[in-house]
Amino acid sequence: MAFAAAFSSTMAARAEAPLEASKAAAPDGTPSAPTADRWDFYTTGRIGSFVSWAKGDGMPEAATLDPVTGMERHKVLIDAGGSGPGFASAYNQQPSNMRVSSIDSIRMRSGFTGNVIGFGARRKLGESTVTGYISMTSVVDSLSQRKYFQSTPDVREGYLRIEGSWGSFLAGKAGVLFNRGAVTTDFLYLHGYGVGFPGDLNSVNGFPTAGQIGYGVLANGFAAGFVYATPPVAGAQLSVGVYDPASVTGGSYERTKYPRGEFELTVNELLGNVGKAHAYFNGGYQINYHPNLSDAETKAFYGLGYGARVEFGRFHLGAGGHWGKGLGVTYPGLPGPATYDAESNLKMTNGYFVMAQVLVGKFDIDAGFGRTNVTPTAGELTEDPLGFKYDHGNGLGVFADPKNSVLKTQTGISGAVVFHAADWLHFDIDVMHADAEWNLGERQRILYVNAGTTVTW
């Protein structure tokens, strides 16, 4: 798909998924609480397996040709990690003479969050609580579909947290602040027990599944850093963090110096006795440097995320979006033409989504819509001076296309039905219609259908 190499196994951009904790039990079977003289050990986890069917257009061909002369009009830039072979699209309502291809693929894979197992320990320190936690994630997808090839677990989290009436302090690797509210909404209201967008149909690069990420939702990812969160005041809480900088690989500004700063402001409010509301506003900023030039040569990627969730009884609704520079379509700084152009100029992107959920007995009925927009740079819109001149038949004269066609939008419409057979056993059927468009007319549309089960503890 036009999805830009969705996620690397080390980035873990899928979600900071809330997990259901099993506290260590006392001899009488009641859950224990941490004390000053002993540790409380616990484990969290989930294991899921799904069958996933994808049917639709193949990837656009590497170039679009003129249907009359057969001359190349422009290259088509595809981010790494695409899902299929070529797809001959239309340009100005005229079909090209390229080979037409399609996708029809059935795979077995893990869900949106992957298979996760975590281990933690808690202990009291005065009036505060100290927690140590580590989690590992494994993706079911077979590398290059070779069933004997074992995936390597991804140590996604490992941190120390101290919390008390003064707030909390976290040190280590955990989900970052920028746009975690959007990913949490996707988990809670749409893809927490499903798949959504598979990310990579062939698993050639071992990319995990992605839920709604890339289609209106930007992943928050995981990183090593330090985070302080204030105690809640009138339902409001501010978190600020500094993280290891992320190198924008593949471009001309891969060097980093200083930690990346991020923040998140959240507000929680009870709506009488009938519901509750949660709102968030977050952001991040980082400067990158050219490896062979002075520190005066810089590029900065930054972004803001915003959104809210409201719950009235059995009806839940969430909406939000993001905006920024150098964010790509999946997570900030992902290498590829959706993040920067041929001259390493970072691109502006934005996205928005809405998701709804209705609880009917043991069933969740979920639906969502999201769109991510990528703004081409000025150089990508400029006519190629060396290109072949065409009469496009639109009355504007004879001119050449720009050199490249670049991704313009990714739109996803999703739905899911989840049956909770028990509080630890969940069955899911979810669908997603994904539509990607390039700025010179190429297009790719695929329908994904996923079904499977998840065990949580």
Image (spheres, rainbow, N blue to C red):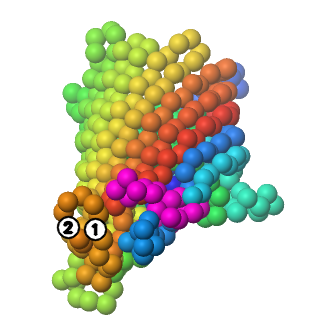
Q: Disc 2 and disc 1: Cα gap in Å?
A: 6 Å
Image height check: is 150 above or below 388?
above
**In the depicted view, which residue is nearer to us: 399 or 232?**
399
Disc number for residue 409: none
* Horizontal side of residue 232 vs 219, given as left or right: left
The three-letter code of the residue at mark 2 reads: Gly
Residue assigned mark 1: 391
Image height check: is 313 above or below 240?
above
The magenta segment is 76-99
Disc number for residue 397: 2
Residue located at (46% from left, 62% from top): 96
Furthest toward the top, the residue is: 273
Callout 2 environment at 10 Å: few (<14), some (14 to 19), or many (20+)? Answer: few
Q: Residue 29's quadrant in the figure? A: top right
Magenta span includes 77: yes
Ranked by sequence position, the earlier of labels 2 and 1 is: 1
The three-letter code of the residue at mark 1 reads: Asp
Residue located at (46% from left, 73% from top): 70
Residue located at (36% from left, 25% from top): 317
Q: Position of residue 161 (x, y in %)?
A: 43, 48
Image height check: is 224 above or below 34?
below
Q: Is residue 135 visible?
A: no
Q: Position of residue 296 (x, y in %)?
A: 18, 83
Secondary structure of the residue carrying tag 2 is loop
* Horizontal side of residue 396 vs 151, given as left or right: left
**In the depicted view, which residue is nearer to us: 116 or 250?**
250
* Horizontal side of residue 101 vs 389, given as left or right: right
Quadrant the C terminus occupies:
top right
Q: Residue 68's quadrant in the figure? A: bottom left
Q: Position of residue 80 (x, y in %)?
A: 50, 66
Marks 2/1 in contact by CB < 8 Å: the verdict is: yes
